[in-house]
Image (cartoon, coloured by chain):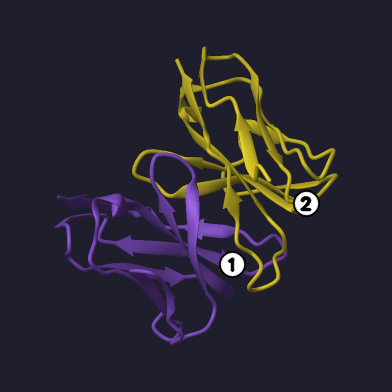
Chain colours: A yellow, B purple
């Protein structure tokens, strides 16, 4: 199993550009998450999905959109990039939210720089 | 507001030292607490703790949870330079989505 994969690894965007961060998992996990991590800060939840076709906002959703058409894929879309979106983005997945089975497994991250 | 607080924020030790990292939390509906190690890339899972007083152990690392006092500690004995990393504590809050609330992390540097 490849686990959780993310592309690209690094990207520079100009203000106002748009892009999609890709995330895929091959563990047949129902739950998928997008986090951002700013320097010196913990991870903050952007969006999450509890299954194909179902998504919901996390703590910091403004400026982002997601979709979940398949169990495997959970892309994150930035429509109008802003410098405040400069961050490292992590995708994660988990099998269940049953207590004891809720460990989230993380992808390698995408480092995004908006200039 | 739900929060997870880790201390210290950074720590420098020498190889062979023992370190204790702290994590305290205030959440409305606690389910479990997780420890992750983050080196250059993705956080990697270390432990999940759901019950008070039961120590989880993996090699030189161990962790325990106190649900009455709302904190957990992560111990690393006989530290090695490879233990240098950011250690993240996260709490799973109640609800169907299994959201993780992260602390800011403790940056551990182990000097030769």
- Image location of residue B86, percent across then percent down: 35, 51
Secondary structure found at label 2: loop
In the visual, does B81 lie left or right of A81?
A: left
What is the quadrant of residue A103 in the picture?
A: bottom right
**Label 1 Cα crowd, 10 Å radius (few <14 / some 14-19 / many 20+):** many
Vertical placement of B4 versus B57: above or below? above
Q: Nearer the viewer, residue A93 or A61?
A: A93
Vertical placement of B24 versus B53: above or below? above
Task: State how far apart marks 2 and 1 are (Cα).
Answer: 23 Å
Task: Write down the residue under mark 1.
Answer: B93
Task: Write down the residue under mark 2.
Answer: A28
Residue located 56% across and 59% down the image: B100
Secondary structure found at label 1: strand
* Chain at tag 1: B
- Image location of residue B32, percent across then percent down: 55, 72
* Chain at tag 2: A
Q: Nearer the viewer, residue A35 or A70?
A: A70
Residue located 59% across and 67% down the image: B93
- Image location of residue A72, percent across then percent down: 77, 42
């Amino acid at each position: 199993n490849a686990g959780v994969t993310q592309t690209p690894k690094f990207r520079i965007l100009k203000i106002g550009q748009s892009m999609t961060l890709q995330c895929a998992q091959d563990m047949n996990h129902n739950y998928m998450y997008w986090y951002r991590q700013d320097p010196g800060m913990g991870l903050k939840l952007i969006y999450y999905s509890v299954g194909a076709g179902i998504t919901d906002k996390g703590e910091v959703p403004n400026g982002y959109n997601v979709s979940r058409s398949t169990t495997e894929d959970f892309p994150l879309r930035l429509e109008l990039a802003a410098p405040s979106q400069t961050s490292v983005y992590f995708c994660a997945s988990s099998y269940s939210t049953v207590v004891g089975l809720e460990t989230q497994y993380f992808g390698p991250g995408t480092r995004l720089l908006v200039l | 507001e739900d929060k997870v607080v880790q201390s210290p924020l950074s720590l420098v030790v020498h190889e062979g030292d023992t370190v204790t990292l702290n994590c305290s939390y205030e959440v409305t509906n606690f389910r479990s607490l997780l420890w992750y190690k983050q080196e250059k890339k993705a956080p990697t899972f270390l432990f999940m703790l759901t019950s008070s007083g039961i120590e989880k152990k993996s090699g030189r690392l161990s962790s325990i949870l106190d649900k009455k006092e709302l904190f957990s500690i992560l111990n690393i004995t006989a530290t090695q330079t490879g233990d240098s990393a950011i250690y993240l504590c996260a709490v799973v809050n109640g609800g169907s989505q299994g959201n993780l609330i992260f602390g800011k992390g403790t940056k551990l540097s182990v000097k030769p």
